[in-house]
Amino acid sequence: MMKKLLTILLALSTLSVNAQEQSKFRKGVKKAFKFATFYGAVTGGNSISDVDVYSVTNGLETNTIKTPFDFSIAVGVRKIARLGYENRANVFYDGTERSYSDAATIGRIKGFEFLFEADWTRQQGKSLFNQHHFLRYVANHWIGKVEFLKDGFADIEYFEASERYRYKVDKQGKLSLNIGHVQRLSKPYGYNPLEEWMLSNGSLHYTDLALQEGYSVEFNGQGGETYYDPAGNEVATSSEVWEAVVIPQVLSDYTNRKKDELTQTIEYSFVIGFDFYHYTKNFWVHSWGNIMPYHIKTGNEFSYHTYNGGQWIDYSGGLIFGRRFNKSLGVFLEGKYNKYWNRSWHNFSVGINYVVL
C-alpha cells in the first residue's frame, strides 16, 4: 500500500513539474513573439509585352515570344522595432516592403530581434526563390547575429554568423564601434570548371567538352556535318549554329553541374564595423558599415584564397538620410551596398518631396 501511495505521489509531483515547465515554455514563446508580425501575400501584374520574331528561312514566318505575368508569393514573420524615420504607411505587410535598416548591425532596441522571409517570384519570365532570415541580439557591450541570404537576382547565397564586441563612443550611444569574428558558409565562389579546358592561347576546347558530355557529330564526306545531343536528337547542321546556339548551352549545363557537385566551403574572417544613428523630427542620419580585411587561410582546395591568389577585402554598408527644410520641402537618400567574394549587390533610392499647403 505504501509503495502505491509513493508511486501516486511521485506521478502527481511529476505532472506538476511538467505543467510548470510547459507554462514557462508557453510564456517564453509568447514573450519571444510579442509584437512580432506574421504575414503572407500574393502580388502580381503583367510583365513585358510580347515580342514578334520574324524569319525568312522558309518564307516569311512570324513567331511570338510570350512572357508570362509577373507574380510574388511572400510569407514571413518579423520582429524588428521601427526606427524614428520609418513611416509605416501601409496598414498590412505584403512582403514587398523594402526596409534598408534591416541590414544595419544594430537595431533600435537592445535584445532579441528576428526576420524570416521567403519569396517565390517570377519576373520577366524568370522564376526565383529568394530567402532572407536573421536572428540578432544586441547588448551594451556585445552583438550576436546569424543570417541566411539567398538572392536570385544577385546570384548570391550564404550563411553568416558573427560575434562582436561593441564599444559606445558617446554616452547617448549614437555612435558605436564593433570588432569581432565572422564565419560564412557558401558555395565555392571563384571556382571556374572551364579552366581545365582552357588552352594556352586563351581559347576553349569546347567541342571536346561537348563530346565528353555525350554530344556527337557526323560528317557526310562532302564538307557537311550534323550534331546530336546525348539523347540522339539533331541539334545543329552547321558549325555556325553549333557554336552560336548549342555550345553556350553545353558550357552552361557543364558549369552548373560541376558547381553543384561541390560541397560548401567555410570562411573565417575578422570584421570591424560601426553604426551611427541620429534622429530628430526634421533631420535624421542612420549609417553603418562593416569591413573584413583579413580571412584565415584554411587550406581548403576550393577556398576563395585559391582563386583570388591571396587575401581580399569584403565589405558592406548603408546610409539613410532625411532632411525636412520646412512643412513643405524635404529630401531623402537611402541605400545599401554589399561586396562579398568580389560579387556586389546594392539598392538605393533618392528623392525630393514638396507638399503644397
Image (tube, grey):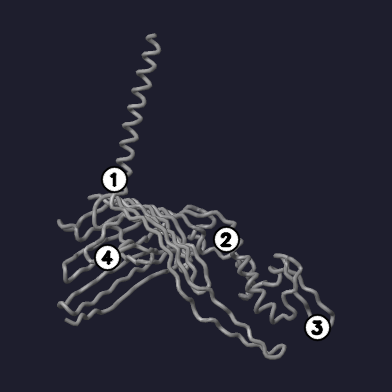
Rounded to the nearest angstrom, the CA distance separating label 4 from label 2 is 42 Å
Q: How much space separates mark 4 and mark 1, taking CA atoms?
A: 23 Å
Provide residue 296's location: percent of width, then percent of height. Answer: 43, 54
Q: Secondary structure at mark 2?
A: helix
Q: Which residue is mark 1?
A: 31
* Badge 3 element: loop
**Type of residue at label 3?**
Gly
| Camera-side mark, 1 or 2 | 1
Q: Quadrant of the N terminus?
A: top left
Figure quadrant of residue 42: bottom left
Which quadrant would residue 331 be assigned to in this image? bottom left
Q: Does 24 sit left or right of 265 as displayed? A: left
Instruction: Say which label, 3 or 2, has the lower sequence index.
Output: 3
Nearer-the-camera pick, 170 or 279:
279
* Residue 231 vertical position relative to residue 244 in the rendered view, above or below: above
**Is tag 1's residue or tag 3's residue first in the polypeptide sequence?**
1
Check disc 2 and give the amino acid type.
Lys
Mark yes or no: residue 269 visible: no
Mark number displayed over residue 88: 4
Read off the residue under disc 3. 223
Q: Position of residue 105 (x, y in %)?
A: 30, 58
Question: What separation in Å lies between label 1 and label 2 (alpha carbons)?
Answer: 43 Å
Q: Amino acid at mark 1?
A: Lys
Quick check: marks 1 and 2 in contact, CB under 8 Å?
A: no
Task: Name which of mark 4 and mark 1 comes first in the sequence.
Answer: 1
Q: Are marks 3 and 2 in contact (CB under 8 Å)?
A: no
Q: Tell me the mark number nearer the camera, choosing from 1 and 3.
A: 1
Pointer 1 local density, CA inside 10 Å: few below 14, some 14–19, many at least 20: few
Specify which label sits upstream in the sequence, 4 or 2.
Answer: 4
Element class at badge 4: loop
Q: Are marks 4 and 2 in contact (CB under 8 Å)?
A: no
